[in-house]
Image: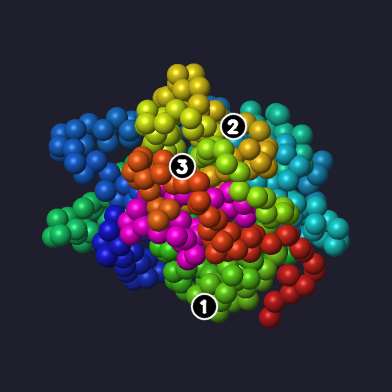
Amino acid sequence: MKVNIYKKLCNYCDKILISNKNSLSILSYSKLHVIKNHPDLIKEYLLSDHLSKKVKVELKTKSFLSSIVSYSKLFYSEKPNFYLKKKYIKKVDVLLISDLMNIKHLNLIDDFYFGPMENKLKKIGLSSKIILRNTTQYLSKHLFRNLKKDKVILSKRTFLVKELIFVICAFFQYLRFNLFFDKFKINKKKINFFNLRSFGYIVYNFRLNFQINRLLKIFNPKYVVIPFEGHAWERLIIKNIKKKGIKVFAYQFSTITKHHHSLFRKLDNETNPDCIFTTSKQIQNIFKKKYNCPVKIIGSSKSKKSKLRGLKKNKSVLILPEGYVDESKLMLKFAIKTLTYNKNIKFFLRLHPMIDISELNINLKNYPNIELSNCKIIDDFKRCTFVLHRGSSAAVQAVSYGLNPIYYGKFDEFNVNPLYQEFDKNYYVEDVIKFIKILNNKTHTRQNRAIFNAKNYFKKMNINKKIFSIK
């Protein structure tokens, strides 16, 4: 989406949120929280705009009916609210609300979002408990059976009566939006992204808020730490937790791009965190300009100590897409197309934990020069010279290790480059020939400014008791 239209979309959604700031159901509607100008996110607002009206109706009906069937099955297969080990129920100092995106992460030593934070809190005398939102395709009860660590896994449903109330509320808002709200316009053409299925976001966010509320009563924490990416559910539970007199700390753990919006869009003090944790000084400075609350550096598990290696001469490329199927498929197809021009290039595809290779519908056995990576990320860094990326935080790690970054996409459209401030415009590519020329350039030099920026993006995690001390 062009930047001027994107800004209009952001203003349109913000106006609805601000003018209805006392409505929890409107606050809970995820589509009003425009995260960033990423094609896989923006298409949610312009979905199937090129299709005929008849095809649109058929697709929406099919999608809606399949969602209803899946939703109904949960009442037979899941117990309400959450799964926890009762013998570990006791008061804790800190609740950490995290995500489980991949079943492989279930029993990892460090959390995907918070890294070693739980262990570091323990060392300074603070007890904690990790609450996992289950965003995998698996039922929470199946995950809980395989859980070896002391964590809480949220169920995909709550009590039947509560679910009915949430559904009725969401449906009421669907009617309200479609009957009484002016539609978004692009070049005088009305775009209605208020489809019925999308109002399921309200049901999910209300459920999450209810589940967290019950866990607050069980564990009675002094502090709650949540990931901070700009989602609707974050704002909703911040509002709920602050009402109870509990301090909320929001951890911005990932990368920031040029057109991030909802992360920096202030609504009111009730939905803003009491304190923001960041990964480095440069990120802290950005947040200080946007928020009045304290902003503290705690670092990240993504920080990797490494000496900058000499430039290798091999043509090995690490592909690092974000957690979107379409983006992963697009970058993989670009690699395949590249190999039709030059078969001497070796690609290593490292998918985001949310994506399974089967979702791409491309058989890598047909492409021996493209290898699906399942090794440790540091090993990928050691064997590659270039990293082809878009908005991935892992790309920042790769660049800090010394890989030369190449951004897949245009400089002036859908720019989600986390290193955009110090990135050479010549390394933005969509054309295969240009890409191969970069790889073949024997005199190419490092993007030193981008590497410097990357090395300072994630500082080593350091936690002490003072981090929870705020005025």
Amino acid beneath label 1:
Lys
Residue 358 in the image, given as x and y percentages of width and height = 48, 25
Which disc number belongs to residue 401? none
Point out the frontmost of discs 3 and 1. Answer: 3
Rounded to the nearest angstrom, the CA distance separating label 2 from label 3 is 24 Å
| Residue beneath disc 1 | 289
Q: Earlier in the sequence, mark 3 or mark 1?
A: 1
Point out the frontmost of discs 2 and 3. Answer: 3
Q: Is residue 46 visible?
A: yes
Question: Counting other residues with Cα less than 10 Å from the Cα at mark 2, is it few (<14), some (14-19), or many (20 or more)?
Answer: some
Is residue 167 rendered to the left or right of residue 210? left
| Residue beneath disc 2 | 373
Q: Which residues are magenta?
A: 396-425
Q: Residue at x 47, y 61 (%)?
A: 423
Between 325 and 378, the residue placed more toward the observer is 378
Helix, strand or loop at disc 3?
helix
Point out the frontmost of discs 1 and 2. Answer: 2
Between 5 and 341, the residue placed more toward the observer is 341
Amino acid beneath label 3:
Asn
* Location of residue 30 with respect to 107 vertically, above or below: below
| Residue beneath disc 3 | 440
Q: Earlier in the sequence, mark 1 or mark 2?
A: 1
Q: Residue at x 73, y 60 (%)?
A: 461
**Residue 398 magenta:** yes
Helix, strand or loop at disc 1?
helix
Q: Residue at x 26, y 61 (%)?
A: 5
Rounded to the nearest angstrom, the CA distance separating label 1 from label 2 is 39 Å
Quarter the N terminus occupies: bottom left
Q: Earlier in the sequence, mark 2 or mark 3?
A: 2
Between 10 and 377, the residue placed more toward the observer is 377
Q: Is the Cβ of the residue at disc 1 closer than 8 Å to that at disc 2?
A: no
Amino acid beneath label 2:
Ser
